[in-house]
Amino acid sequence: MYYGYGLDPTMILLIPAIVFALYAQSKVTSAFYKYSRMRNSYGHSGYQVARRLLDAHGLHDVPIELAPGRLSDHYDPRKRILRLSQEVYNSNSLAAVGVAAHECGHAIQHQEGYAPLQVRNAIAPVASIGSQAAWLFIMGGLLIGFTGLFDIGILLFTVVVAFQIITLPVEFNASGRAIALLEGQGLVPVNELGPAKKVLDAAALTYVAATVSAILQLVRLLVLRGRRD
């Protein structure tokens, strides 16, 4: 029996993902807030740390821009630009230097041709389209009862799930690089690496939560698809 999109019993599959996502978000918010109030002993700002790390790896031509929004920090592999949010760019907190180093980790991954990053970049355009279009096909298939549309939606959403899964090693690797870079370049005292790592570990949880959510959503769609046979 079909219960209508958003009202069927399969929604219970998403409850663990929702709880996990809320927990992950609270962890990253609390960790960033806590360590954004702790100044690194050397007084380096997020921008200074990023510039030092990029230059140390021969990435002198990668500019660092100020990005609007909160925690909007990212490395753009298409334009080869590293963007830092206001609270990271100008701050000399342990949270700021950790985030800045993490984004430099992505730039270095790109420079070295890190395989998981290359795969993620390759499927990113399809995943971006799929994340929106998938639900149009799924809703269309449910509303008019055409299984073919529903199947196209599931296929598109599967690409989104693949993107989320491949994102995990990319992010964990960048965080690992960040701590090694901060220590190797002597930008943060050894006793201050722990707090920076805690911020990055908390941020990594949000990616894990997003992946779990995507996988459970796909399972739910497959269950719905099976009921229609």
Image (spheres, rainbow, N blue to C red):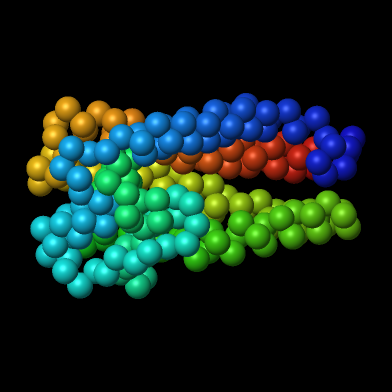
**Count of picture labels:** 0
Q: Could you tell whether 34 is left or right of 57 in the image?
A: right
Residue 75 horizontal/vertical position (percent): 35, 60
Taking the image as shown, residue 16 lies to the left or right of residue 89, namely: right
Q: Quadrant of residue 34?
A: top left
Q: Quadrant of the C terminus?
A: top right
Q: In which quadrant of the rendered image does the N terminus lie?
A: top right
Q: Is residue 112 left or right of residue 70?
A: left
**Is 98 situated above or below 87?**
above
Position of residue 217 measured from the top left corner of the image (x, y, whole percent): 65, 40
Give above or below for 195 relative to 151.
above
Q: Report the front residue among 41 and 54.
A: 41
Snapshot quadrant of residue 131: bottom right
The answer to whether residue 65 of the structure is visible from this angle is: yes
Task: State whether residue 57 is above or below residue 61.
Answer: above
Residue drawn where x is 58% and y is 42% of the image: 214
* Left/right of residue 171 with respect to residue 125 in the rendered view: left
Residue 13 percent coordinates (x, y)? 68, 30
Q: Which residue occupies 29% across, 65% down? A: 64
Tell me, yes or no, if residue 174 can be seen here. no
Task: State the image coordinates of residue 121 (x, y, percent, origin top left).
Answer: 39, 61
Residue sitting at 48 percent across and 52 percent down? 70
